[in-house]
Image (cartoon, rainbow, N blue to C red):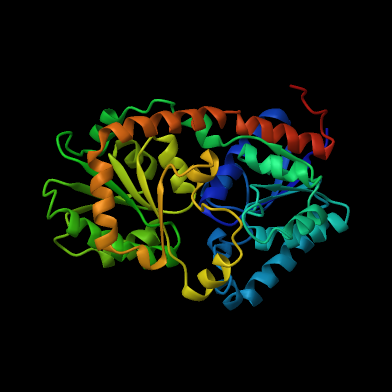
Amino acid sequence: MRALKIGILAGESSGDILGAGLMQALRERHPTLDFYGIGGPLMQAQGLASRYPMDRLSVMGLVEPLKRLPELLRIRRELRALMLREQVDVFIGIDSPDFNLSLEQQLKQAHIRTVHYVSPSVWAWRQRRIHKIARATDLVLTLFPFEAAFYEQHQVPARCVGHPLADLLPLDPDRAAARQALGFRSDAPLLALLPGSRGGEVARLAPSFIATIQNLRETLPTLQAALPAANMERAAQLRALLPKDSGITLLQGQSRLLLQAADAALLASGTATLEALLCKTPMLVCYRMAPLSYALISRLLKVPYFSLPNLLAQDTLVEELVQNQVKPEILAPRLLHLLKDQAAHARLQERYRDIHQSLRLGANTRAAEAVLALSGARQPVHE
């Protein structure tokens, strides 16, 4: 049997996790596979020779990508040429819609099957993008049920595969064991600080998060706090921002274990909010962008929430603070309430658990079966 050739591209760490899980599931179901594209260390460990460092694609907002446009266009041209030269059977773009959808459309026009894995937030803003998605993709793989329903309404082929993290994490995490593993005291509250994985996010959020801890310690002098760095670059950035006497522990990675150990989390909107939900951790969600990008995006929003827990619940499970609301005098009292209100914490955990269960669908397996069926390598599995 000839090798199945798969193009695959992830532009950030969350996509690297999804891509690696999908690649592993594909290898388990097909004897010979060749992968081409861009990915991070996890995808490279599954056999991808990344054509460029993944972080070259990691930009956010409306204005910021314009500064990198010549480089991004050059990378996309090179990838298109690679996929056509190798005659890949299917191309999988993981998230990064501004980059991937244009590439997918070019490849689909060249008669290469295309999959977009992780729906853009087209249901929330810029809904006209649904027409570009329809032109660019043969199939959209969504992480959440409400997304697949949106695509069905617009006659765009889509399948909800669930979220791999929901499969990986236990429904009832062992908070005491996680805290012991990280070496934190069991008799004092622990707060997780997650200001994001991108340099721009950290620059905008981390100073306020750090100052909030100093504010909180006036009321809770025994408060423990930890900052997990997504990579070595973020560790250096955070180390430079931390005062010498901050008393905040800087961790290398281990964000998931910290969320399992913490009594509450202060974090950037994004994938980390889903991890906090799956770890059953109360949270305060913050969103701060460059002012011009926020001014443009806020006018286009079509939904009342921006955090994943609230979108999944279609209810205000967690409080969301944006732009100038992200300052210590506003964050500190809200976090103090989160840390002290145990009755609300118990109710919240039940809601979290229900959502967790709804996302436990065997995501890597579902995604791999859908890709193989689209490529013609095997018939789809009927459930």
Task: Identify the image quadrant of residue 202.
Answer: bottom left
Q: How many marks?
A: 0
Name the side, left or right, on which 215 lies relative to 331: left
91 or 268, nearer to the observer: 268
Instruction: Find the residue positioned furthest to the top.
Output: 383
Residue lying at 24% horizontally and 42% vertically, measured from the top left? 339
| The quadrant where residue 72 appears | bottom right
Q: Is residue 45 visible?
A: no
For this rendering, which residue is in front, 229 or 274? 274
Check the picture and name the quadrant holding the N terminus.
top right
Q: Position of residue 367 (x, y in %)?
A: 68, 36
Residue ID at (74%, 68%): 77
Visible in this render: residue 258?
Answer: yes
Residue found 45% across the figure and 61% down from its top: 198
Position of 186 relative to 94 (above/below): above
Q: In what quadrant of the picture does the C terminus appear? A: top right
Front-most of residues 70 and 166 = 166
Relative depth, front residue between 290 and 164: 290
Residue occupying the point 74% across, 62% down: 102
Q: Horizontal and vertical percent for residue 251?
A: 30, 50
Q: Position of residue 107 (x, y in %)?
A: 81, 57
Left or right, 294 with reference to 340: right
* Image location (x, y in percent) of residue 14: 53, 49
Query: Is residue 2 placed above or below 113 in the rendered structure?
Result: above
- Residue 190: image quadrant is top left
